[in-house]
Image (cartoon, rainbow, N blue to C red):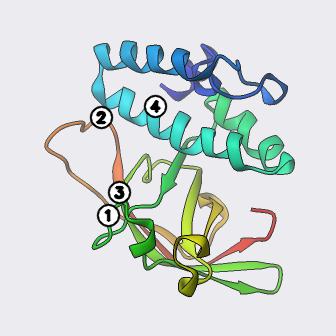
Amino acid sequence: MWKKLGDAGLLGITVDEDVGGLAMGYQAHAIVMEELSRASGSIALSYAAHSQLCVNQLQLNGSPAQKKKYLPGLIAGDKVGALAMSESGAGSDVVGMRTTAKKVDGGYVLNGTKMWITNGPDADYIVVYAKTEPEAGSKGITAFIVETASSPGFAVSRKLDKMGMRGSNTGELVFDSVFVPDAQ
């Protein structure tokens, strides 16, 4: 599915052309979402998590080097993306999250658990929100890019069974002393 969506240009519909996107904007993205939803709500949900929550985060907030490294594979459908923000006990309240990122030489070490992460069990790249300065509230939260295949300490602790949308994989993710380089 991902490769076919990439071949059709749909995974980078809001992304700038210089990194492989179509630069068509959010109205075009909404139309694609509507049409995918007509055929399969599950596919549309996974598509939205990939194209909006991961790809668009990188498009809007990534450094030029991050865009060059991550967006081509995500846009082509060669890589799957996710965003990990929600936590058990905090939901989508980012200020209430407990996942931390401590500065170490050359990067950060992430510790915590994320819950209800769409595409989490399948993702190659995950944009993870963690507290870097807990006392700073919402201003002390940083987003990191975790490459799942090369991040010791990262695990999908369980794939969640849902009443609907079963074609869209959702999971609980564990970050146990996961090192993330400064560049990510």
Mark 4 surroundings within 10 Å by alpha-carbon count, few (fewer than 14), some (14 through 19), many (20 or more): many
Q: Residue furthest left?
A: 163
Which numbered mark, 1 or 4, is in the foreground of this view? 1
| Image spot of residue 76 (x, y percent) | 67, 27
Q: Quadrant of the C terminus?
A: bottom right
Find numbered disc 4 in the image and state the secondary structure of the residue it sits on: helix
Pick whichever of labels 4 and 3 is earlier in the sequence.
4
Which numbered mark, 2 or 4, is in the foreground of this view? 4
Q: Check disc 3 and report the residue beneath it.
A: 171
Pick whichever of labels 1 and 2 is earlier in the sequence.
1
| Image spot of residue 97 (x, y percent) | 42, 74
Q: Check disc 4 and report the residue beneath it.
A: 47
What distance separates the C-alpha of mark 2 from that of mark 3?
Answer: 13 Å
User: Which mark identifies residue 91?
Assistant: 1
Q: Residue at x 43, y 79 (%)?
A: 98
At label 4, the amino acid type is Tyr
Find numbered disc 3 in the image and state the secondary structure of the residue it sits on: strand
